[in-house]
Structures are given as C-alpha cells and as structure tokens.
Image (spheres, rainbow, N blue to C red):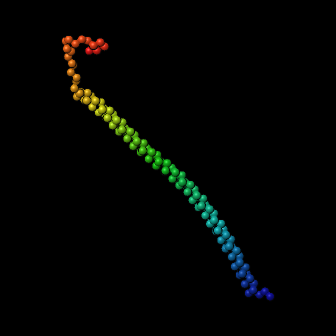
Amino acid sequence: MWGRSNIGKTVEELTDHLRLVDHVRALQDGQKEIAEAIRAVNQRLTSIEAEFRVLKAETQRDALREVQHAVQGVQTSVHDELTRMATRLAVLEQALRREAVRQQPQPAATPRLPGTPPRPDGSR
C-alpha cells in the first residue's frame, strides 16, 4: 500500500505543485503590473503628445507674430521712404517750374505809334 517512500514522493509532488501554483500567481500578478505600467506609460505619452501639439502651435503662433511685426516694420519703412521721395520730387518740380519761368524771356512792351487810333473793342 502506501509506503513511506510513496508518501514522501506524493508530498514532494504536492509541494512542487503548490510552488508552481505560487509561481503562476506571481507571474499573473507581474503581468498585471506590467500591463498597468504599459497603460500608464501610454497615457503619459498621449499626454506628452498633446503637450507637444500645444507647444508646436504656440511656437508657430509666436513665430508668425514675429514675422508679421518684421513685415509691418519693412512696410512702414518703405512707406516712409516713398513719402520722403514724393516730397522731394514735389519740391524739385516746383523748383524746376520756378527756374523755367525765370529763364523765359520777358516780352518787350510794343510801343504805340502816336497816330494809331484806339481799337473799337477797348483793347490796346
């Protein structure tokens, strides 16, 4: 029947089986912890991606504002220079007109002959 050796083997097998059950439970717990850690990392990565999207949008907005300010500065500068050039041109045109008027010969007054009768329309 059951001898000591059979009982000893049965106890060993039972102990091995219980160890295996404990190891399986530990592995299952470990798998659950790993799955939870992976979920937490995935959530953090999703959060970081969203933060990067926001950061990228803010950076693009800031860069666009800087470019807009630079373009406005250039436009203002060009406008001011065009205004100065237009003013200089107007001053030069006036000076040229004055100079042209000064250089035109003045018509000499035609003397009236003493016997010329006055014109009927009253002009001289």
The spot of residue 12 in percent (x, y) is: 71, 81
Q: Nearer the viewer, residue 6 or 29?
A: 29
The count of marks equals 0
Q: Measured along the vertical axis of the image, is residue 88 above or below residue 23? A: above
Which residue is painted at 59% across and 61% down in the image?
A: 42
Is 26 positioned to the left or the right of 80 in the image?
right
The spot of residue 31 in percent (x, y) is: 64, 68
Which residue is painted at 28% across and 30% down in the image?
A: 97
Q: Which of 26 and 39 is in front in this view?
A: 39
The spot of residue 25 in percent (x, y) is: 68, 71
- Classify the position of the C terminus by image quarter: top left
Q: Nearer the viewer, residue 113 or 87?
A: 113
Q: Measured along the vertical axis of the image, is residue 17 above or below residue 35? A: below
Q: Nearer the viewer, residue 105 or 74?
A: 105
The spot of residue 119 in percent (x, y) is: 27, 13
Q: Measured along the vertical axis of the image, is residue 124 above or below residue 86? A: above
- Classify the position of the N terminus by image quarter: bottom right
Which residue is painted at 62% across and 66% down in the image?
A: 34
Is 83 positioned to the left or the right of 19 in the image?
left
